[in-house]
Amino acid sequence: MNDTAAVGIIRNSSRIILIKRKTSSRDPWSGQIALPGGHIENGETVEEGLLREIMEEVSIELSTESIVGEMEPASTIISPELKVFPFILDYPDLEMAHPGPEISEIKIVNVYEYEENTTERGLPALNYDGWYVWGMTYRILSEYIRGNFKSYKKKYRSF
């Protein structure tokens, strides 16, 4: 499997889409709260993989024209070799999103309305009405909230 992934902060003004992953023994992030996205398949650009994953996970079709920003690649503690490219996408009607087969639930939240919290293991977390965002998603959203992203410049990286 490719060690490259992409996630999208899909927004309309200050509102964004969060997903809750279905419980699965094959998914190391099973049951967690995340941003839509996933692994890039061989031969895909990062952008193509991101748009495919968004369609699979939240059932909305976007184009590269929706991509307005990007952030520095991130990685996870449990898979440090995995390089995750975060993108910011504008979409006018977030309510059109509905869960794909790997997603149990979708929540639309105001990205700036959260409580600082910690997980049961003492890790920092953002609490969005009972949905605890921690780990890599926490780091990505914290950077986004602080404005640490840049305008998107089409790069079309293939893997």
Image: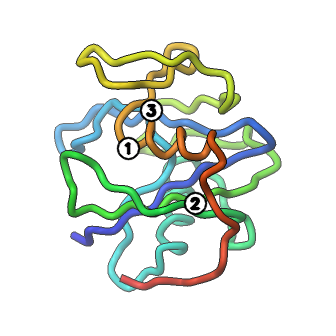
- Give the CA distance from mark 1 to mark 2: 14 Å
Amino acid found under the numbered disc labelled 2: Phe
Q: Name the residue under label 1.
A: 136
- Give the CA distance from mark 3 to mark 1: 15 Å
**Picture quarter containing residue 81?**
bottom left
Q: Residue at x 66, y 61 (%)?
A: 61
* Figure colour scheme: rainbow
Q: Which of marks 3 and 1 is in front?
A: 1
Q: On the rendered image, what quadrant is the N terminus found in?
A: bottom left
Q: Which residue is drawn at 33% across and 30% down?
A: 31
In this view, 14 is above or below 123: below
Amino acid found under the numbered disc labelled 3: Lys
Circles 1, 2 touching at the beta carbon (< 8 Å): no
Which disc number belongs to residue 87? 2
Which disc number belongs to residue 20? 3
Amino acid found under the numbered disc labelled 1: Met
* Position of residue 145 measured from the top left corner of the image (x, y, whole percent): 63, 39
